[in-house]
Image (spheres, grey):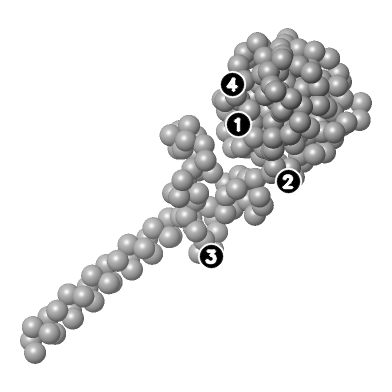
Amino acid sequence: MIRIFAALAVALMVLGSASSARATSDDDFFNFFGRGRQQQQPMQQRGHPYPDMQQRGYPYYGPGSDYYGGSSSPIPRERVSSPVALPPGSIFISTSERRLYLILGHGEALRYGIGVGRDGFRWTGTHHISAKKEWPGWTPPAQMRARRPDLPRYMAGGIDNPLGARAMYLGSTLYRIHGSNEPETIGHAVSSGCFRMTNEDAIDLYNRVSVGTLVVVR
């Protein structure tokens, strides 16, 4: 009988220790995010979609995470017939469709949903990708800061940066194809001339193209 009571006591001590450890962990988590109710652990604990950001210590709370509350993109990318005759590897952007096509060859293309410039900010032309950057910093141009004095002079790269996870720069212009932490804007005319994609799509495109890629905007 003594052995049974001893075993029960040890079991209770182990359970109590485990509960205490869980409570401490949860309290630290809630204090960090200023939340008063239990939630799941951040997505970085369950497979961070951006390993480079995970290595830098950034948790992920954007599209596709349990904290975002929405799907990664309202317009899934898909393989379609190419709408134009351009060399394989080229990018064709249709501002009227609000779609970006990566030309694959053999009459096919990979189509992505994008956000385009709002009225007065849309443009057409031909450029080449002049630079590629991961988690780029953002320096709002003077014209934009004149319209929006509340904007910072510079914002470091990260989850909250409007350039998102990746940016592909177009020639010597201020325009970019870049990611976004606002997937609900994809398919709409909302930008100041840049072409925005979900972070997932921006990473996918970034990995498929190189500096020098032809970009045709119509």
Q: In this view, does 33 lie above or below 194?
A: below
Query: Mark 2 — residue?
Result: 74
Q: Do the residues labelled 1 and 4 touch (CB within 8 Å)?
A: no
Identity of the amino acid at label 2? Pro
Q: Are marks 4 and 2 in contact (CB under 8 Å)?
A: no
Q: Which residue lies furthest to the bottom in this view?
A: 1
Query: Mark 4 — residue?
Result: 133
Mark 1 or mark 4: which comes first in sequence?
4
Tell me the number on the disc at residue 37.
3
Q: List x then y, in percent, for residue 47.
A: 46, 45
Mark 1 or mark 3: which comes first in sequence?
3
Identity of the amino acid at label 3? Arg
At a point 59% along the width and 53% down the height, the residue shown is 67
CA gap, disc 1 to disc 2? 16 Å
Q: How crowded is mark 2: few (under 14 residues within 10 Å), some or many (20 or more)?
A: some
Q: List x then y, in percent, for residue 73.
A: 69, 44
Say which of marks 1 and 4 sits in front: 1
Relative to residue 184, is residue 201 drawn left or right? left
Query: Mark 1 — residue?
Result: 204
Relative to residue 143, is residue 39 drawn left or right? left
User: Looking at the rendering, in which quadrant would you find the N terminus?
Assistant: bottom left
Mark 1 or mark 2: which comes first in sequence?
2
CA gap, disc 1 to disc 3? 35 Å
Element assignment for label 3: loop
At a point 64% along the width and 35% down the height, the residue shown is 201
Element assignment for label 1: helix
Identity of the amino acid at label 1? Asp
Asked whether residue 41 is in view, the answer is yes
Q: Is residue 120 above or below residue 200?
A: above
The one of 67 and 16 positioned closer to us in this rendering: 67
